[in-house]
Image (cartoon, rainbow, N blue to C red):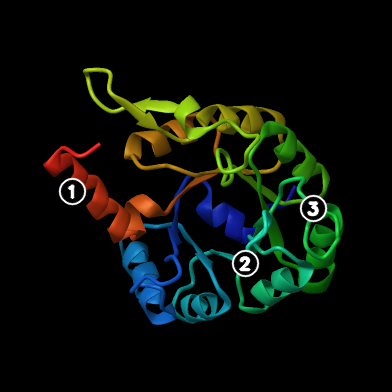
Amino acid sequence: MTTHPALEAIRGGLVVSCQAYPGEPMRDPDTMCRVAQAVAAGGAAGIRAQGLADLRRIRAALDLPLIGLWKDGDGDVFITPTLDHALAVAATGADIVALDGTRRPRPDGRTLAQTVKAVHERTGRLVMADVSTREEGLAAAEAGADVIGTTLAGYTPYSRRPEDTPWPRSSTGETHPGPDLDLVAELAGELSVPVIAEGRYHLAEQAAEAMRLGAHAVVVGTAITHPTTITRWFARAVTGEP
Protein backbone atom coordinates (compact mmCIF):
# COMPACT_ATOMS: atom_id res chain seq x y z
CA MET A 1 0.00 0.00 0.00
CA THR A 2 1.35 3.43 -0.97
CA THR A 3 1.89 5.74 1.96
CA HIS A 4 1.24 9.46 1.64
CA PRO A 5 4.49 11.49 1.53
CA ALA A 6 3.42 13.62 4.51
CA LEU A 7 2.92 10.53 6.65
CA GLU A 8 6.24 9.09 5.54
CA ALA A 9 7.96 12.37 6.38
CA ILE A 10 6.76 12.34 9.99
CA ARG A 11 7.18 8.59 10.55
CA GLY A 12 9.25 8.06 13.70
CA GLY A 13 9.55 11.80 14.25
CA LEU A 14 8.41 14.67 16.42
CA VAL A 15 5.53 16.90 15.34
CA VAL A 16 5.39 20.18 17.25
CA SER A 17 2.06 21.86 17.96
CA CYS A 18 2.40 25.63 17.54
CA GLN A 19 -0.70 27.13 19.13
CA ALA A 20 -1.55 29.91 21.56
CA TYR A 21 -4.71 30.45 23.57
CA PRO A 22 -7.11 33.36 22.94
CA GLY A 23 -6.05 36.59 24.61
CA GLU A 24 -2.38 35.62 24.96
CA PRO A 25 0.44 37.81 23.62
CA MET A 26 1.59 35.00 21.31
CA ARG A 27 -1.83 34.60 19.70
CA ASP A 28 -0.66 36.14 16.44
CA PRO A 29 -0.10 34.46 13.06
CA ASP A 30 3.34 35.97 12.56
CA THR A 31 4.44 34.91 16.03
CA MET A 32 3.19 31.36 15.53
CA CYS A 33 4.95 31.22 12.17
CA ARG A 34 8.21 32.22 13.82
CA VAL A 35 7.68 29.59 16.51
CA ALA A 36 7.13 27.01 13.77
CA GLN A 37 10.34 28.10 12.05
CA ALA A 38 12.21 27.83 15.35
CA VAL A 39 11.06 24.27 16.05
CA ALA A 40 11.81 23.32 12.44
CA ALA A 41 15.38 24.47 13.04
CA GLY A 42 15.44 22.23 16.10
CA GLY A 43 14.52 19.12 14.15
CA ALA A 44 10.72 18.95 14.13
CA ALA A 45 9.51 16.54 11.46
CA GLY A 46 6.17 18.31 11.13
CA ILE A 47 3.98 21.10 12.48
CA ARG A 48 0.47 21.07 13.93
CA ALA A 49 -1.24 24.46 14.04
CA GLN A 50 -4.69 25.99 14.27
CA GLY A 51 -6.46 28.92 12.69
CA LEU A 52 -6.63 29.80 9.02
CA ALA A 53 -4.28 32.79 9.18
CA ASP A 54 -1.67 30.84 11.15
CA LEU A 55 -1.84 27.93 8.74
CA ARG A 56 -1.42 30.13 5.68
CA ARG A 57 1.63 31.86 7.15
CA ILE A 58 3.25 28.61 8.23
CA ARG A 59 2.53 26.94 4.89
CA ALA A 60 4.16 29.82 3.02
CA ALA A 61 7.24 29.71 5.25
CA LEU A 62 7.88 25.97 5.65
CA ASP A 63 7.84 22.84 3.53
CA LEU A 64 7.39 20.50 6.50
CA PRO A 65 4.22 18.40 6.70
CA LEU A 66 1.48 20.54 8.20
CA ILE A 67 -1.41 19.23 10.28
CA GLY A 68 -4.09 21.91 10.31
CA LEU A 69 -7.17 22.48 12.39
CA TRP A 70 -9.58 25.25 13.27
CA LYS A 71 -10.83 25.60 16.84
CA ASP A 72 -14.21 27.27 16.77
CA GLY A 73 -17.31 27.43 18.95
CA ASP A 74 -17.99 26.67 22.60
CA GLY A 75 -19.66 23.28 22.25
CA ASP A 76 -18.20 19.86 23.00
CA VAL A 77 -17.01 19.51 19.41
CA PHE A 78 -14.84 22.51 18.56
CA ILE A 79 -11.79 21.09 16.77
CA THR A 80 -12.62 21.65 13.09
CA PRO A 81 -16.26 21.07 14.05
CA THR A 82 -17.97 21.08 10.64
CA LEU A 83 -17.29 20.16 7.05
CA ASP A 84 -17.06 23.83 6.12
CA HIS A 85 -14.31 24.26 8.71
CA ALA A 86 -12.48 21.22 7.34
CA LEU A 87 -12.65 22.47 3.76
CA ALA A 88 -11.34 25.87 4.84
CA VAL A 89 -8.41 24.23 6.63
CA ALA A 90 -7.63 22.16 3.54
CA ALA A 91 -7.64 25.32 1.43
CA THR A 92 -4.76 26.76 3.49
CA GLY A 93 -2.44 24.11 2.08
CA ALA A 94 -2.36 21.92 5.18
CA ASP A 95 -1.40 18.35 4.26
CA ILE A 96 -3.57 16.78 6.94
CA VAL A 97 -6.88 18.10 8.25
CA ALA A 98 -7.30 17.35 11.96
CA LEU A 99 -10.81 17.21 13.37
CA ASP A 100 -12.77 15.92 16.33
CA GLY A 101 -13.03 12.18 15.85
CA THR A 102 -15.20 11.39 18.86
CA ARG A 103 -18.72 10.05 18.64
CA ARG A 104 -20.22 13.27 19.92
CA PRO A 105 -22.74 15.03 17.64
CA ARG A 106 -21.17 17.42 15.15
CA PRO A 107 -22.65 20.93 14.85
CA ASP A 108 -23.57 20.53 11.18
CA GLY A 109 -25.34 17.21 11.76
CA ARG A 110 -22.97 15.21 9.57
CA THR A 111 -21.46 11.97 10.73
CA LEU A 112 -17.72 11.60 10.99
CA ALA A 113 -17.75 9.23 8.02
CA GLN A 114 -19.65 11.74 5.89
CA THR A 115 -17.20 14.49 6.80
CA VAL A 116 -14.14 12.37 6.10
CA LYS A 117 -15.51 11.23 2.75
CA ALA A 118 -16.30 14.79 1.69
CA VAL A 119 -12.83 16.03 2.64
CA HIS A 120 -11.25 13.21 0.65
CA GLU A 121 -13.44 13.74 -2.40
CA ARG A 122 -13.37 17.53 -2.49
CA THR A 123 -9.78 18.25 -1.45
CA GLY A 124 -7.70 15.07 -1.62
CA ARG A 125 -6.33 15.86 1.83
CA LEU A 126 -5.70 13.34 4.56
CA VAL A 127 -7.84 13.40 7.71
CA MET A 128 -6.55 13.00 11.26
CA ALA A 129 -9.24 12.05 13.77
CA ASP A 130 -8.61 13.27 17.32
CA VAL A 131 -10.09 10.69 19.71
CA SER A 132 -10.21 10.02 23.43
CA THR A 133 -10.86 6.27 23.74
CA ARG A 134 -10.04 2.97 22.08
CA GLU A 135 -13.62 2.61 20.84
CA GLU A 136 -13.53 6.05 19.24
CA GLY A 137 -10.23 5.28 17.57
CA LEU A 138 -11.53 2.05 16.05
CA ALA A 139 -14.72 3.78 14.91
CA ALA A 140 -12.82 6.69 13.37
CA ALA A 141 -10.62 4.33 11.38
CA GLU A 142 -13.74 2.51 10.21
CA ALA A 143 -15.16 5.90 9.19
CA GLY A 144 -12.23 6.40 6.84
CA ALA A 145 -9.82 8.56 8.84
CA ASP A 146 -6.26 8.27 7.56
CA VAL A 147 -4.60 8.93 10.92
CA ILE A 148 -5.79 8.48 14.48
CA GLY A 149 -4.57 10.84 17.21
CA THR A 150 -4.90 10.30 20.96
CA THR A 151 -5.27 14.07 21.31
CA LEU A 152 -8.47 14.09 23.36
CA ALA A 153 -7.61 11.32 25.83
CA GLY A 154 -8.48 12.70 29.26
CA TYR A 155 -10.32 15.68 27.81
CA THR A 156 -13.72 14.07 27.43
CA PRO A 157 -15.82 13.26 30.51
CA TYR A 158 -15.87 9.55 29.70
CA SER A 159 -12.20 8.95 28.88
CA ARG A 160 -9.46 7.99 31.34
CA ARG A 161 -8.67 10.98 33.50
CA PRO A 162 -5.14 12.42 33.61
CA GLU A 163 -4.81 11.42 37.25
CA ASP A 164 -5.37 7.82 36.17
CA THR A 165 -2.27 7.91 33.93
CA PRO A 166 0.51 8.99 36.34
CA TRP A 167 4.09 9.31 35.24
CA PRO A 168 6.99 8.96 37.71
CA ARG A 169 9.11 12.10 37.90
CA SER A 170 11.81 11.14 40.37
CA SER A 171 13.48 8.29 42.23
CA THR A 172 11.30 9.13 45.24
CA GLY A 173 8.22 7.94 43.36
CA GLU A 174 6.69 11.39 42.84
CA THR A 175 4.14 11.29 40.02
CA HIS A 176 2.08 13.72 38.00
CA PRO A 177 -0.61 13.28 35.36
CA GLY A 178 0.90 11.97 32.16
CA PRO A 179 -0.21 10.92 28.68
CA ASP A 180 -2.47 7.94 28.07
CA LEU A 181 0.21 5.56 26.88
CA ASP A 182 -2.13 2.59 27.27
CA LEU A 183 -4.39 4.11 24.61
CA VAL A 184 -1.43 4.47 22.25
CA ALA A 185 -0.53 0.81 22.75
CA GLU A 186 -4.13 -0.34 22.29
CA LEU A 187 -4.74 1.56 19.08
CA ALA A 188 -1.31 0.86 17.57
CA GLY A 189 -1.85 -2.83 18.20
CA GLU A 190 -5.27 -2.96 16.57
CA LEU A 191 -5.24 -0.48 13.71
CA SER A 192 -3.64 -0.61 10.30
CA VAL A 193 -3.66 3.19 9.97
CA PRO A 194 -1.00 5.31 11.71
CA VAL A 195 -1.55 6.28 15.33
CA ILE A 196 -0.14 9.60 16.47
CA ALA A 197 0.46 10.06 20.19
CA GLU A 198 -0.66 13.44 21.49
CA GLY A 199 -1.82 14.93 24.76
CA ARG A 200 0.20 15.78 27.91
CA TYR A 201 3.59 14.72 26.55
CA HIS A 202 5.66 16.90 28.85
CA LEU A 203 8.84 14.83 29.07
CA ALA A 204 11.15 13.48 26.39
CA GLU A 205 10.95 10.06 28.04
CA GLN A 206 7.19 9.99 27.54
CA ALA A 207 7.56 10.69 23.83
CA ALA A 208 10.16 7.95 23.52
CA GLU A 209 7.89 5.49 25.33
CA ALA A 210 5.01 6.29 22.97
CA MET A 211 7.25 5.45 20.02
CA ARG A 212 8.29 2.20 21.67
CA LEU A 213 4.60 1.31 22.04
CA GLY A 214 3.96 1.69 18.33
CA ALA A 215 3.14 5.34 17.68
CA HIS A 216 3.79 6.55 14.13
CA ALA A 217 4.85 9.95 15.50
CA VAL A 218 4.45 12.06 18.64
CA VAL A 219 2.93 15.52 18.86
CA VAL A 220 4.26 17.80 21.61
CA GLY A 221 2.88 21.28 22.14
CA THR A 222 2.76 22.89 25.58
CA ALA A 223 6.16 21.64 26.77
CA ILE A 224 7.86 23.22 23.75
CA THR A 225 5.77 26.14 22.53
CA HIS A 226 3.82 27.52 25.50
CA PRO A 227 6.12 29.68 27.64
CA THR A 228 3.36 30.72 30.06
CA THR A 229 2.77 27.13 31.14
CA ILE A 230 6.46 26.23 31.19
CA THR A 231 7.21 29.27 33.33
CA ARG A 232 4.42 28.30 35.72
CA TRP A 233 5.95 24.83 36.14
CA PHE A 234 9.31 26.27 37.08
CA ALA A 235 7.88 29.07 39.22
CA ARG A 236 5.88 26.63 41.30
CA ALA A 237 8.90 24.38 41.74
CA VAL A 238 11.06 27.29 42.86
CA THR A 239 8.51 28.75 45.26
CA GLY A 240 7.27 25.39 46.53
CA GLU A 241 3.69 26.00 45.45
CA PRO A 242 1.62 22.88 44.72
Question: Label for residue 197?
Answer: none
- Classify residue 168 as left or right of residue 234: right
- Classify residue 120 as left or right of residue 191: right
User: Along the polypeptide, which appears first: circle 1 or circle 2?
Assistant: 2
Residue in the image at 38% along x and 27% along y: 167
User: Along the polypeptide, which appears first: circle 2 or circle 3?
Assistant: 2
Question: Residue pushed farthest top?
Answer: 172
Q: Are marks 1 and 2 in contact (CB under 8 Å)?
A: no
Question: Label for residue 95?
Answer: 2
Task: Tell me how far mark 2 sits from mark 3, CA to CA.
Answer: 25 Å
Residue in the image at 56% along x and 43% along y: 155
What's under tag 2, amino acid-wise? Asp
Judging depth in this view, the residue of 114 and 82 nearest the camera is 82
Residue 192 seen in the figure: no
Task: Tell me how far mark 1 sits from mark 2, CA to CA.
Answer: 38 Å
What's under tag 3, amino acid-wise? Pro
* Residue tagged 3: 105
User: Along the polypeptide, which appears first: circle 3 or circle 1?
Assistant: 3
Provide the secondary structure element on which disc 2 rests.
Answer: loop
* Residue tagged 1: 235
**Rendering coords of residue 1 (x, y %):** 75, 47
Judging depth in this view, the residue of 214 and 128 nearest the camera is 128
Task: Tell me how far mark 3 sits from mark 1, CA to CA.
Answer: 40 Å
Q: Residues within 10 Å of mark 3 (few under 14, many from 20)?
A: some
